[in-house]
Image: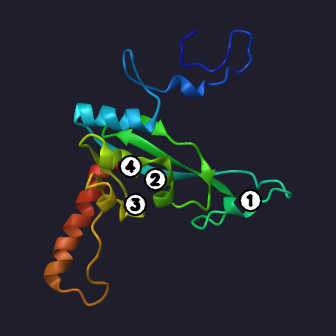
Amino acid sequence: MDRSTITRANGEVRPLPAGRGCTISRGVRLRTLAEVIDHLGASGKTGIVDGTEIRVRRPAVGRKDRDTFISGKSKQNAARTMVVTDAEGRVLFCSPTRPGSCADIKHARQSGLVKLLADGPAVEILADADYQGLGALAEGRLVTPPHRMFKKNAPGWYEEIDERQRKAHPSRRIR
């Protein structure tokens, strides 16, 4: 039986230990977000961060924080998590879940990502527009798509530049 299976020989499901972490290479396991940032900085690799929603059953009637699980994005009961991958798309870190009403930018602040990027090694983390505003707090190490300067009646020269910039960022992020 290889180590990637989750069932035991007697047929019962083996729980995955939370402290096992993510195996990068033989003997190297990343267990915390700080270890992931240090690994990306030491190896000179680019990281990608994104938040995702996981649909959940509606919490019990008596639970006082029942309404916090309703996501404003999907209008469903959800839990949110933040995932950090490397440039090849390998999952390096998956944060603990939070209620669905928590925004991606708030989740990044609460998990300590901004502080780790500001105080840690020089590393580039690519993020989507949900994380705009954190780049300045993380000393430019969190890269988001550029803001649009003109909402209406943009000059022709700006449209060309904006289109190039808006296509360049997602092409680096998507794996």
Instruction: For residue 90, say whether it is visible.
Output: no
The residue furthest bottom is 153
What colour-coding does the image apply?
rainbow
Q: CA distance from mark 2 to mark 4?
A: 10 Å
Residue 21 appears left or right of 85: right
Q: Are marks 2 and 1 in contact (CB under 8 Å)?
A: no
Reading the chain from its start, which is encountered first: label 3 or label 4? 4
Secondary structure at numbered mark 2? helix
Number of residues whose C-alpha sits closer than 10 Å to that of mark 4, classed few (under 14), some (14–19) or many (20 or more): some
Q: Earlier in the sequence, mark 1 or mark 4?
A: 1
Q: Quadrant of residue 156?
A: bottom left
Badge 2 or badge 1: first in the primary sequence: 1
The residue pinned by badge 4 equals: 115
Real-space Cα distance between discs 2 and 1?
21 Å
Q: Are marks 3 and 2 in contact (CB under 8 Å)?
A: yes
Q: Residues within 10 Å of mark 2 (few under 14, many from 20)?
A: many
N-terminal of the pair, mark 3 or mark 2, is: 2
Residue of label 2 = 108
- The dot on residue 65 is 1
| SS for dot 4 | helix
Type of amino acid at the residue the image marks with label 1: Asp
Q: Which residue is mark 3?
A: 131
Instruction: Kindly state the secondary structure of the residue where label 1 is placed.
Output: loop
Q: CA distance from mark 1 to mark 3?
A: 25 Å
Residue 76 in the image, given as x and y percentages of width and height:
67, 62
